Image (cartoon, rainbow, N blue to C red):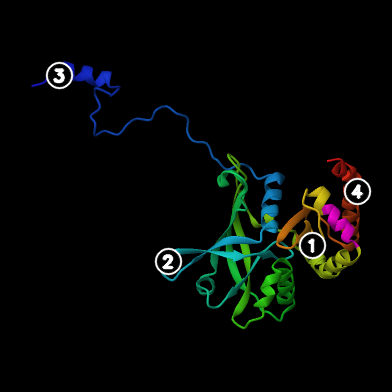
């Protein structure tokens, strides 16, 4: 029989508690309690969330299948005037049937970048889908905005088995990078409804006017303010918080320094941004 004193010495030498048996649970190590990783929501977080959503051309949409398992699929995206995500889907797609049976869904927007993809900002939206009636004022606006964002979708957008869905935001999780986690609500992401409606009423004419008469300003916005390549950039949409630009498959988002809610405030903001770009144009030439 082994010496019990020797047995305790062996336990001490191996950093084990000589009293506690190997079957007893370990005691807390004395490390401080884990702090809440969610940061308080601030304007930086709200601005990043809006930028990720408004800039996205695609995302990973997860729906609930008939077997109860979430099913993820890649889908093209646009946004309504207030920022609500929009999709165009075929009745033949499994996720369409899933949304009709259970409108709950989630959407991951993760544009990525160089290096570790987890080092870049991304957002997951908790959503409730709603099918859009095509011939309503809302349906016509959504079709116009979606095709402005996704022009190649015009090839099939009017097929009888395709439908637009608006994905109402109920909550969101934003990861702005290491140690930058936020939980957001709809009001943190969407444009204020009254302002969105006011801009929606003038958007189509304003976009056409910018493309026809102010192509030079659009080019300056892209090249000087957003650091994009030179080219014939076009406006594709606008809302209270910013202007959408496109050149081929490339898209840009020019955020406004303050929300706009009328034709007058829109003209003023766009003129000031153009003046700002022209002021910095010599710096671009020197570079």
Q: Do callouts 4 and 3 mark residues in contact (Cβ within 8 Å)?
A: no
For the record, the magenta segment spans 214-221
Quick one: label 2 or label 3, which is nearer the N terminus? Answer: 3
Marker disc for residue 4 = 3
Q: Is residue 277 left or right of residue 47?
A: right
Q: Is residue 15 left or right of residue 43?
A: left
Quick one: label 4 or label 3, which is nearer the N terminus? Answer: 3
Residue 143 image-quadrant placement: bottom right
Residue 208 image-quadrant placement: bottom right
Q: Secondary structure at mark 1?
A: strand
Q: CA distance from mark 4 to mark 3?
A: 87 Å
Q: Nearer the viewer, mark 4 or mark 1?
A: 4
Q: Nearer the viewer, mark 2 or mark 4?
A: 4
Q: Is residue 276 above or below residue 54?
A: above
Quick one: label 2 or label 4, which is nearer the N terminus? Answer: 2
Q: Do callouts 2 and 4 mark residues in contact (Cβ within 8 Å)?
A: no
Which part of the image, by quadrant, shows the C terminus?
top right
Residue 256 seen in render:
no
User: Mark 4 highlights which residue?
Assistant: 278
Q: Position of residue 139 (x, y in %)?
A: 70, 76
Q: Main secondary structure of the magenta part?
A: helix
Q: CA distance from mark 4 to mark 1?
A: 21 Å
Q: Do callouts 4 and 1 mark residues in contact (Cβ within 8 Å)?
A: no
Which is more toward the observer, 129 or 53?
53
Q: Is residue 139 magenta?
A: no
Marker disc for residue 68 = 2
- Neighbor class of circle 4 (other Cα within 10 Å; few <14, some 14-19, many 20+) is some
Quick one: label 3 or label 1, which is nearer the N terminus? Answer: 3
């Amino acid at each position: 029989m082994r010496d019990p004193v020797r047995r305790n010495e062996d336990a001490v030498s191996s950093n084990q508690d000589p009293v506690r048996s190997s079957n007893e649970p370990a005691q807390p190590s004395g490390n401080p309690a884990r702090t809440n990783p969610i940061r308080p929501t601030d304007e930086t977080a709200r601005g990043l969330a809006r930028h990720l959503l408004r800039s996205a051309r695609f995302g990973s949409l997860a729906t609930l299948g008939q077997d109860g398992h979430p099913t993820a699929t890649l889908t093209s995206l646009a946004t309504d005037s207030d920022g609500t995500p929009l999709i165009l889907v075929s009745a033949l797609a499994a996720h369409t049937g899933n949304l009709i049976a259970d409108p709950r869904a989630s959407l991951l927007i993760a544009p990525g970048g160089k290096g570790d993809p987890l080092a870049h900002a991304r957002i997951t939206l908790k959503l409730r889908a709603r099918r859009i009636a095509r011939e309503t004022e809302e349906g016509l606006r959504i079709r116009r905005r979606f095709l402005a964002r996704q022009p190649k979708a015009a090839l099939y957008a009017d097929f009888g088995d395709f439908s637009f869905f608006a994905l109402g935001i109920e909550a969101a999780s934003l990861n702005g990078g290491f140690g930058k986690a936020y939980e957001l609500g709809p009001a943190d992401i969407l444009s204020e409804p009254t302002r969105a409606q006011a801009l929606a009423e003038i958007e189509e004419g304003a976009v056409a006017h910018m493309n026809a008469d102010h192509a030079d300003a659009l080019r300056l916005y892209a090249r000087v303010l957003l650091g994009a390549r030179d080219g014939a950039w076009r406006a594709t949409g606008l809302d209270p918080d910013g202007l959408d630009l496109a050149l081929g498959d490339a898209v840009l988002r020019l955020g406004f320094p303050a929300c706009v809610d009328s034709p007058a405030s829109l003209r003023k903001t766009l003129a000031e941004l153009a003046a700002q770009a022209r002021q910095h144009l010599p710096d671009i030439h020197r570079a």
